[in-house]
Amino acid sequence: MFPQPAPRQSPKQTQTPGHELSGIPAGLPSAVAQLAHDVTLSDAELVRRTLAGQHDPFAALVARYQKRAFWIAYHVVGRVEDARDVTQEAFVRLFRSLAKYDFARSFYTWFYRIVMNLAIDSLRKIRSARAGSIEDILGGLPDSRAVAGDVPLERTEENGQVWAVLDKLDAKFRAVLVLRDIHGLSCREIAPVLKVTHATARWRLHRGRQMFKEHWERLQGGPEQ
Amino acid sequence: MSSPACERTLAMLPLFVGGDLDAATAEPVRQHLLACLRCRGEASSLQRATGSMRRLAAEPAADVDDGMFAAMNRAIMDQVLVTDVAELTAATSTMSGRRWLESVAAVLLLAFGFWCGQASWQSSVLQRAPMATPANDGPANDGPAIVVPYAGPRVPQRLLGDDVQDGYPLQPGDAAGLMGRERLRSLVDEGMVLPARRRATSQPPR
Ligand SMILES: [Zn+2]
């Protein structure tokens, strides 16, 4: 049979059993966890309460978005340490600019934009620091991407190849692939996050997938039949 | 060998395999793939590559668990708590105040620039400082200086050593290349040139 197009994913549905790209972490103070889990409290309401002088609502906002922010940053920069720094910095910047939040717009688009800008900056710094180093010459060996647990060996090898290909792509194409193919945002959602038009987001996705496939086949020794 | 239908399909494939085309655009692609083996091969390799990327979502990373996220939440709040929430709005109003001052400064600067431009543009040539300065020890240039550009020689240049001009032998002292007063007088005497006073009343010689 010919390939069927993949079903569309919404960012809030991206979950894998035992490993979540989103969700509220356990181990938070109970007041914070309660606010974070309360579905009747919108993100905008948590922002309003923070601006009114409460701190727990902001901790609840962090709880709602920290996993997503971390994993997006991780898939863009490729290292746990850097992704953690990007996530923390993004929340601190978010807090400092909270008074400028436009309540008519979606909170997560605004926040993801902060995360993505920091992640792309971080990736560019990593790349310029690595240029010409032995790590670069050897083709970017996985460092902190060493996977834990009972992941099959072949899957690990395949993921290593995916990381190697992502490392070859320009940051703007990598960003759109991470948001669409790994995190399941639609092009309509991606465009304002990357501050580009919908048409540009689609073009980058088109070009990004094409380039990904070409590099991926080259890595596997020519096109497969 | 690829037909126009293949070209159209191949151009759509990267978005088709990810489910990013609307139904009306995806249908002709689907129909073509049913019939074309080559495009189908291309579609499945694109889908394999994209699929491998999607599987990255399920890959765990070392030391990343709920414990790390809870610690991160605390670290963020520690950094944030040093900023009083009241400072947020204060920072915003200070910022807007500073921005207002910057705007006023920019407008004033622009106005000054315009005024300078207008002033130099409106002043006439006569009101400007003289462009020609007196030669060494010459008289002071008190009056208005009108500079007339030199438009080049108006009479034929005479070669060095050439002592004949217009068929007349040149006398020593004649202005070389320029019509001297004496030479003009001799031309008037010979009837070659009419003085301005007489020109109005008499006919020029043919
Ligand atoms: Zn075809």
Image: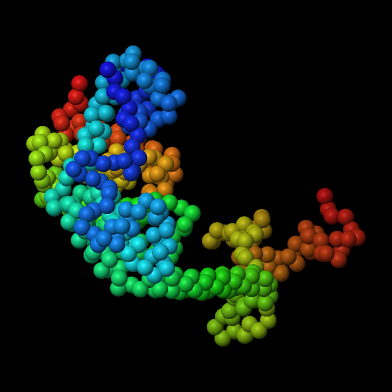
Q: Is residue B25 toward the left or the right of residue B188 in the image?
A: left
**Residue at position x 29%, y 23% in the image:** A3
**Residue at position x 78%, y 63% in the image:** B188
x and y, in percent, of residue B10 in the image: 34, 25
Which residue is at the far top? B35
Instruction: Name the foreground residue: B42 vs B55.
Output: B55
Does any portion of residue A121 appear in the rendered image?
Answer: no
Instruction: Name the foreground residue: A56 vs B202.
Output: A56
Q: Is residue B154 toward the left or the right of residue B46 in the image?
A: right
Count of marks placed on residues: 0
x and y, in percent, of residue B120 in the image: 62, 72
Instruction: Name the foreground residue: A131 vs B99.
Output: B99
Q: Quadrant of the N terminus of chain B?
A: top left
Q: Is residue A77 toward the left or the right of residue B204 in the image?
A: left
Give residue B33's quadrant in the image.
top left
**Residue at position x 39%, y 38% in the image:** A202
Which residue is at the far right? B201
**Residue at position x 24%, y 59% in the image:** A28
Residue A163 higher or lower than B184, as above or below: above
Instruction: Name the foreground residue: B70 vs B200.
Output: B70
* Colour convention of the picture: rainbow
Does any portion of residue B74 appear in the rendered image?
Answer: yes
Q: Is residue B87 toward the left or the right of residue B65 in the image?
A: right
x and y, in percent, of residue A162 in the image: 19, 38
Residue A224 higher or lower than B175, as above or below: above
